[in-house]
Image: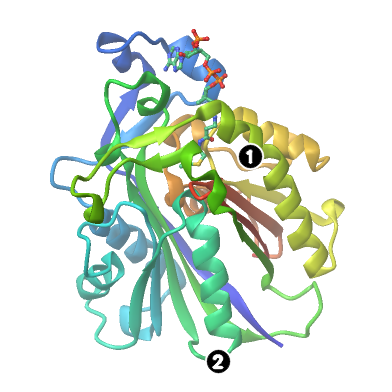
């Protein structure tokens, strides 16, 4: 059995940190409301002119360093983002050029907040089918560019950042003791388009802003996240008691807590970074993996479940042994 095993992890956050209190000057909101309803305390925003591919490149370099690899060791780059620099080419190809990688292939994946889970599943498919040996998987976003700064229901919730993993093919035994990705579960349901979307795009003629029915997204989130995590565990032949860490998409602490409760896992088995990053969409899971590793929470051999839901709706989970 070929497994896609994690060789390195890294992240990058832009320098500018914005505390909740800074929104009080321009919006009818408060630090207390934002903390209580979302768990968010601060977030990073990219500097003017700083693009998603730049954030992604910095996270990629950190992950390659951690793996002890050079860019030309890679066969592929998959970048999950909804905020690419340009309509085309794919931001992943810009990262490829920035890294000085002259071989292999690079492409973007667009599944909004579930993007990193979708990208991981695609990287796993490339590796286990023999199409690639080493794949760099990145989640990077500049959601600050699609905020309506007059909408207090959305603009206080999101942040910018990037995280990256290097995966490499390794022969496994076919048991759940193997390191690497053990199972994946992907879902989408386009009927829920209107609960979370950007009201513009190339073919509509203007770039648009993020629109969200927060309460409606919340209603779907816990149930769908717990369900996809359970499905992924079932596919791997594992159960909740085997989990060392849930590394969830970091949108809202109440969704994270609700999902952990539904999965019968105490919060000391959950990596939480939402207080410091806000919702960084496709970047939130690789950021949390990198921070969780740096904090000493995630150790080699730990069983990890990542799960995410976002616009589409699109949702999914990946079970992997670090
Ligand atoms: N400050 C103060 N008051 C606010 C703010 C704010 N920033 N935003 C909204 N309010 C008000 C609302 O107007 C509402 O007032 P009303 O009762 O007079 O109408 C009141 O607060 C309560 O609003 P709700 O929307 O019911 O508040 P809720 O407890 O649901 O929290 C939140 C809102 C944080 C958006 C929550 O619903 C949520 O997190 N939903 C999920 C969102 C999510 O996870 N999105 C990301 C998933 S996918 C992706 O990441 C792209």
Using residue 28 as the reference point, say whether residue 299 is left or right of it. Answer: right
In the rendered structure, which disc, 1 or 2, sits on the residue that comes first in sequence?
2
Question: Can see residue 244?
Answer: no
Q: Is residue 240 visible?
A: yes
- Toward the viewer: 148 or 2? 148
Count residues near mark 2 (Cα–Cα under 10 Å), then give few for <14, some for 14-19, many for 20+: few
Viewer-closest of 63 and 193? 193
| Residue under the image location 85 percent in, 57 percent down | 239
Which of the 4 image quadrants contains residue 53? bottom left
Q: Residue at (61%, 43%) from the top-left corner?
A: 271
Q: Quadrant where the C terminus lies?
A: bottom right
Outermost left residue: 49
Q: Give the labeled residue for mark 1.
A: 221
Ligand 1 lies under 8 Å from the Cβ of mark 1: yes
Residue shown at the point (48%, 49%) measured from the top left: 113
Q: Quick one: SS at disc 2?
A: loop
24 versus 49 height, above or below: above
**Image location (x, y in percent) of residue 278:** 44, 34
Of the numbered discs in the image, which one, if any, rests on residue 198?
A: none
Spot occupied by residue 15 in the image (x, y as percentages of width and height): 26, 39
Tell me how far mark 1 sits from mark 2, CA to CA: 34 Å
Quarter of the figure with residue 319: bottom right
Residue holding disc 2: 130
Task: Please give the name of the residue rendered at 32% of the width and 78% of the height, measured from the top-left corner.
Answer: 71
Q: What percent of the width, then of the height, locates residue 14?
A: 28, 43
Q: Residues within 10 Å of mark 1 (few under 14, many from 20)?
A: many
| Residue 267 placement (x, y as % from top left) | 72, 35
């Amino acid at each position: 059995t070929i497994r896609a095993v994690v060789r390195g992890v890294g992240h990058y956050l832009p320098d500018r940190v914005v505390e909740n209190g800074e929104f009080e000057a321009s919006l009818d909101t408060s630090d207390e409301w934002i903390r209580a309803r979302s768990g968010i305390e601060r977030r990073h925003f990219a500097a003017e002119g700083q693009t998603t591919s730049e954030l992604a490149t910095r996270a990629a370099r950190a992950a390659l360093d951690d793996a002890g690899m050079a860019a030309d060791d890679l066969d592929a780059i998959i970048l999950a983002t909804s905020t690419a620099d340009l309509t085309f080419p794919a931001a992943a190809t810009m990262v490829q050029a920035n890294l000085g990688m002259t071989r292999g292939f690079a492409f973007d994946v667009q599944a909004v907040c579930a993007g990193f889970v979708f990208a991981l599943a695609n990287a796993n498919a490339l590796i286990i089918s023999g199409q690639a040996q080493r794949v760099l998987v990145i989640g990077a976003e500049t959601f600050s560019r699609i905020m309506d700064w007059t909408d207090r229901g959305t603009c206080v919730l999101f942040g910018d950042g990037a995280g990256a993993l290097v995966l490499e093919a390794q022969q496994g035994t076919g048991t759940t003791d193997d390191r690497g990705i053990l199972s994946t579960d992907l879902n989408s349901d386009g009927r829920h388009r209107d609960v979370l979307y950007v009201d513009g795009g190339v073919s509509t003629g203007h770039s648009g802003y993020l629109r969200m029915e927060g309460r409606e997204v919340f209603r779907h989130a816990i149930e769908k996240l717990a369900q996809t995590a359970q499905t992924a565990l079932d596919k791997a032949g594992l159960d909740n008691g085997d989990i060392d860490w849930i590394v969830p998409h970091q949108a809202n602490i109440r969704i994270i807590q609700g999902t952990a409760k539904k999965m019968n896992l105490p919060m000391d088995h959950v990596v939480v970074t939402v207080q410091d990053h806000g919702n960084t969409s496709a970047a939130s899971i690789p950021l949390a993996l990198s921070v969780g590793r740096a904090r000493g929470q995630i150790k080699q051999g730990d069983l990890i479940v990542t799960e995410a839901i976002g616009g589409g709706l699109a949702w999914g989970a990946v079970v992997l042994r670090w």
